[in-house]
Amino acid sequence: MSVEYFKEGEWWVSPYNTIDEVTSTFDLPEKVEIHDATLRDGEQTPGVVFSPEDKIAIAEKMSEVGVDRIEAGMPAVSPDDYKAIKQICSLGLKSKIYTFARAMQSDIDSAIECGADGVIIEVPIGYPKLKYQFGWTWEDVYKKSAPIIKYAKDNGLHTVFFPYDTTRAREDDLENLLNAVMDNCPPDSVGVVDTMGCALPEAIKYLVKKVKKLTNLPVEIHTHNDFGMGVATELAAVEVGASVVHSCVNGLGERTGNAAMEELVLALEVLYGIKMDYDMKKFPELFELVSKLSNVPIAANKPVGGSRNFTRESGIGVDLVMEEPLAMFGTHPHLTGRTGDIVLGKKSGKRSVTYSLEQMGISGYSDEAVAEILSQVKALGIQKKTIISHDEFKSIVDSVL
């Protein structure tokens, strides 16, 4: 592990990330790939519908940013999905293209017809799913899976076995299923899937190590964010060797969403020292596109994608936001295509006002004028219960000066 907690002009994070007591148990892979499911799991966000044209535009932008694998959708969902996936596969993108499939030969045939590079074969293994939703045993899951895994591999697809709701599986069921699969129809990799986002990071580590030991295959991790730990649990999986992390742009996904692609990339690059080869300066273009096409706004304070991540209202440290951002933030704004910003409101100070006046090209003001402007700025911010606009500030300045 080679981590730089400080990189001139790019980031300055905690040096304690790098000490032996923290990193000695890590078993990091040399490379971590992002498998982004925005076009399938992201579209399962209630109310989100992507047209074929939307999906193509998002896939092109994701590939431009550097996403390793794009899950283009599930061909069986609709003719439009089939059409979109086939067109995406024909674009010649740098990203590998995968489809999502049930354990059915027709779904594998669709992936082949579309020209996909790989396929995610989903089957249930969580005990609540088996007991209440399907009425199956692990043997039933195996019998349905085995011929489809073999068929997909025989037809040249990179085959990911995806026993979902893994984190709620009975341990014997999971062991028996994976042992049977490995004895008779080993896939190319296996997913550990926290479908309900209900596992602790340490529980994820336990399962990833267990699956690696049982299969001796690459392990992929797919989590949801029901307890606010989607990214944390995927990073925990990487710490014990998971080499593919599943994500959605802007954290889209069912219920509380999936692990956010942008947060994973930034954390893996900066906090773990894993070279990701992503053009993070183009992130804002991708965030805006996905937000617009999904009609899901991005929270202003959302990690990485939020519009106010590098915005300061408090008067303390105003100069540093512009002159030495790493004194105020863990990453430099330009690392992810952003700039620092100063806004005015209740928490502003005199330096906030003088900075804003300088930005307007105004000079020659007295200390008394600055104090009066600040007083009116604070009063308006309190009255509005938010920051004040440029026009409102200009009106205050005009009235005072």
Image (cartoon, helix red, strand yellow):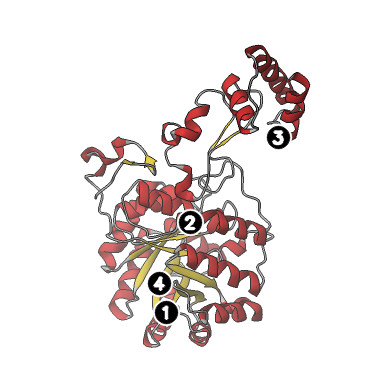
Q: Which label number is shown at residue 189?
A: none
Mark 3 residue type: His
Q: Look at mark 1 in the image and give the residue it sits on.
A: 143
Q: Is residue 165 above or below residue 95?
A: above
In this view of the protein, which residue sits in the foreground, 37 or 186?
37
User: Quadrant location of residue 38?
Assistant: bottom right
Q: On the picture, is 400 further left or further right than 34?
A: right
Mark 1 residue type: Lys
Mark 2 or mark 1: which is in front?
2
Where is residue 204 shown, x and y percent of the image? 37, 52
Which quadrant is home to the C terminus?
Answer: top right
Check disc 4 and report its element: helix, strand or loop: strand
Q: Look at mark 3 in the image and give the residue it sits on.
A: 390
- Residues packed near mark 4 inside 10 Å, few (<14), some (14 to 19) or many (20 plus): many
Q: Look at mark 4 in the image and give the residue it sits on.
A: 161
Residue at the location (50% across, 35% down)?
322
Mark 1 or mark 2, which is nearer the start of the sequence?
1
Residue at the location (35% across, 76% down)?
187
In this view of the protein, which residue sits in the foreground, 59 or 342?
342
- Residues packed near mark 1 inside 10 Å, few (<14), some (14 to 19) or many (20 plus): some
In this view of the protein, which residue sits in the foreground, 348 or 84?
348
Badges 3 and 2: C-beta atoms under 8 Å apart? Answer: no
Mark 3 or mark 4, which is nearer the start of the sequence?
4
Q: Look at mark 2 in the image and give the residue it sits on.
A: 261
Mark 2 or mark 3, which is nearer the start of the sequence?
2
Check disc 1 and report its element: helix, strand or loop: helix
Where is residue 256 shown, x and y percent of the image? 58, 51
Badges 4 and 1: C-beta atoms under 8 Å apart? Answer: no
